Image: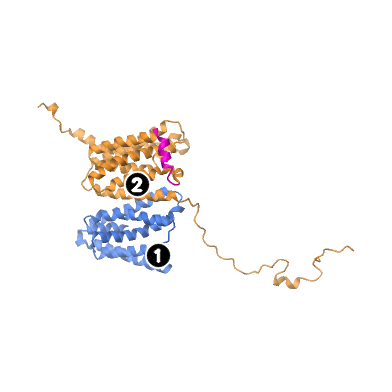
Chain colours: A orange, B blue
Amino acid sequence: MSQHSQPHEPPSDVLAAASKWSGPALMALGLLAAAAIALPPAAGRSTLVWWILSSALAPERILPLVGLGVALALVDRRYSLGALALFGGGLAVGFFRKDWLLSVLEAIPRATSHHFLTGPISTVIVGVALVLPAARLRSWFLLIAAAVAGSMLAAAIEVSDPSLHDIAIPLAGVVVAFWIVAAVSLTVRAFWRIWFPIPARILGSWLIAIGLLYGGASLIPKQKSAFPPPTEPTPDTFRFPEPDRLSPELEPQDRPGARIPPDGLQQP
Amino acid sequence: MFAVGLWGAQMGGRPVWTLPVTFPLIMVAGGAAGMFGLPLPGVEIGIALSILALGSAITFAWHPAEWTALCLIAAFAICHGYAHGAELPFAADPADYIIGFVLATGLIHVFGIGVGLALNKPLGGRLARGLGVLIGLGGVYFLVTALSAA
């Protein structure tokens, strides 16, 4: 058998190192890019930069993507690639069947005022994928979770797009999402340890809690302010006179003749 | 929260992760009750008792059955979740508030696990039990404060 036809040729040290450090490098590059667009004064930001910082990099968008990245690293590479493809498929469904998707989500109470609850839904479903104990069950469920997370992300991008027509906004949203998922997944996979599923489950429980609480908080009406503290009663130091009657202190000074008679002044 | 991680690490085995996974999940139930204004009397006393009980469990290196520990943790998590949930409707940004307190809670659990795993071996685990005494004393202080305020 020739050397060329060997199926599992060991990679060179350089290739192995490049493969190992591709995740951290991707993460560092992304963080540098985020810092580069965040550092200039806010007044000079374009709509795209403003949207990336306020929506694409918002905690409720990042968390499910980080969870998805970790979940992709926990499963077999075939399932991982399948889930990534379904994530892309979910994005496509979200973008091209937006009206149908939003009409489905509209059935949830108060969903329209909270980005159709896309953040809580994707956070919970990715959290469940991380918490599931059986590896095989987790692998299959991850496929569903990735597709749902993708479609929810696309819906969130569409409803938060301030331009309504600029293709750069959804494009930037998709790039940021794939960057987060790939950077986290490659990093976790490169530094894999046997005990990683334990912190992954803990992370999953956090995501479920965040998603459920955020979703629950969206269902109750927003209260603008706390109830005011009870006011202290005004000290009763002066008894206010009743109508048409003077206070007791002024009673002696109320001399006759000083008041206008009830039937008015008489003409002489 | 720190005591939950410390106790799980002291018990070893599955409780190392089942306790910190259970806590935030059950905390959601308490948080929902607080958000929707359901009555739950004695929340502050429950929180103080949870500190005292966990401190005592660590001090005496109590290793109950896993389900017993999970039930205890669940009861405590409802009190903690209720306190957070009751404040939630008044938060300026509920999303950031929730993400902040859940991540903070989880990270304190992880810190507790780390400290617990590090202190399990030296001096036969006496350092961890010493921390349990301090946590228990903190629980007594909070219990007295809560009872005097009630």
Q: Quadrant of residue A36?
A: top left
Is residue A53 in view? no
Q: Main secondary structure of the magenta part?
A: helix
- Who's the residue at 45% across and 35% down the image? A47
Left or right, residue B148 beside residue B52: right
User: Regarding mark 1 in the picture, which secondary structure is present there?
Assistant: loop
The subunit letter for the residue under badge 2 reads A
Q: Position of residue A244 (x, y in %)?
A: 73, 66
Give the number of marks.
2
Q: Is residue A106 above or below residue B115?
A: above
Which residue was labeled with disc 2?
A124
Q: Amino acid at mark 1?
A: Gly
Residue B80 in view (yes/no)? yes
* Residue A128, percent from left and from top: 31, 47
Gap in Å between the C-alphas at discs 1 and 2?
30 Å
Horizontal and vertical percent position of residue B58: 26, 63
The C terminus of chain A lies in quadrant: bottom right
Residue A63, relative to residue B32: is it above or below?
Answer: above
Identity of the residue drawn at 41% across and 44% down: A117
Magenta segment, which residues? Answer: A96-109
Residue B89, how many percent across, how many down?
A: 45, 53
Q: Which residue is mark 1?
A: B42
Can residue A50 be found in the magenta stretch? no
The kind of secondary structure element at disc 2 is: helix
Chain identity of mark 1: B
| Amino acid at circle 2 | Val
Other residues around mark 2 within 10 Å, as few (<14) / some (14–19) / many (≥20): many
